[in-house]
Image (cartoon, rainbow, N blue to C red):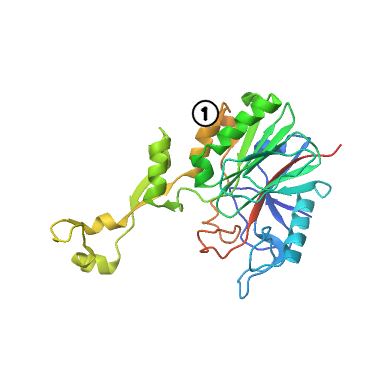
Amino acid sequence: MVRKVSPKQPPRRRTSVPTVLHAPLLADIPWLVHAFSTRAGGVSSFVNSQFAHELNLGNVAWDSTRNVDENRRRFRVALGAADLRLVVLRQIHSDLIRHVDSEIPTTGDALITDKAGYLLSIIAADCLPILIADSKQRVIAAVHCGWRGTARRLAEKVVGRMRMFFNSQPQHLRAAIGPGIRRCCYRIGSDVEEEFRSQFTYASKVLTSRSDPPSPLREKYPRLFITYKSPEFKTFHEPDEETRQIYLDLVLANVTQLVDAGLPRNQIYSEAPCTSCHPELFFSHRRDAGRTGRMMGSIGIKNK
C-alpha cells in the first residue's frame, strides 16, 4: 500500500508506510514513473527523536547502510519501480550533467537518459530536486539545484543538453520542482546575494529584503546594539540595520530559467511545500542545523 498525498496538504500523522508526492504534470505520462519522497515510512530513527519510521535515503553519519538500503527498497516499491536500477550521483553542487547509458556515472548534479530500466534520483534536504520529462521523445532528467547549481544555470543547461543530444523540443517538456526550502525560510548571506545580483537581470524578483522584529532588549536599550564602522567611533550602524535579512526564492529562480529555456510556464509544476516549514513531513538541513536525513526525487522510464 502506498499513501499518495496532495503536495499542498501534507499529512499530520506519521506512518510506517512510505508517503510519496507526485506532480500532476508528470502523473499522466503512461511510460513514466516518478515521485518525491518524504521522511515518513522507513526503518530509520534518530536517538531520542519524536519521530519513528524515518525514510532516510541518504548516507548520513547517524544512520546505517542497512537501514538506507531497506529505505531505498521501500521507496522504489512505493514508486512501482522495484525493477528499475537506482542511479544516484555523488552530488557536488556543480553544473556537471551526466548521461546514463550502459555505464553509470558517479559524480555530478544532473542525470539524463532515454533508456528504460533506470531510476534517476536526486538526494536533497532543502535543495531543489527537479524532474523533467520529454513526453514525445521519451527522455528524462533529474536535476539537483541548490543556490550554486541555480547560479550556474544548471536547469537551463539540462534543457539545452536534452535539445542537443535527443532533439527535445521545449513545448514537449514537462518539469516538476519538488519539495525544497522556499523564500519564506531561505535566508542567505551577502556573498550569495552579490552572486545573484551580478548574474541575473531578474535578481530583484528572487531576492527579498526584510527586517526581523527587534528583541525586547534591543527595543529597550537600542544604543547597546550600535556597531561602529571606524576606530574614531564617528560613524556607526543604526540598530535597525542589524536586523535586515536577505531571502532567496530558489523556486522562482529555477522556474525563470526553465521558461528562459523555452518551457511554457503552464508545463512547470512548482507548488511543492517548503521543507523547512513542515518538520512532520520533510527533512531540512537548514532547519535541523545539518543533523538530518535525506530525501529523493526520482524519475524513470518503465521497462516494457
The residue at 30%/65% (across/down) is 215
- Give residue 285's position: percent from left, percent from top: 54, 59
How many numbered markers are drawn? 1
The quarter of the image holding the N terminus is: bottom right
Q: Does 250 sit left or right of 292 as displayed?
A: left
Q: In this view, does 301 lie to the left or right of 240?
A: right
Left or right: where does residue 169 sit relative to residue 301? left
Which corner quadrant holds the C terminus? top right
Q: Residue at x 46, y 44 (%)?
A: 249
Using the image as rendered, state which of residue 66 and residue 49 is in the foreground.
66
**Which structural element holds mark 1?**
helix
Point out the residue furthest to the right here.
304
Q: Name the residue under label 1.
A: 260
Callout 1 amino acid? Asp
User: Residue 205: x and y, percent?
Assistant: 41, 38
Where does residue 172 sit, x and y in percent of width and height? 66, 26
Q: Is residue 276 above or below residue 128?
A: below
Residue 117, by quadrant, is top right
- Left or right of 66? Residue 36 is left
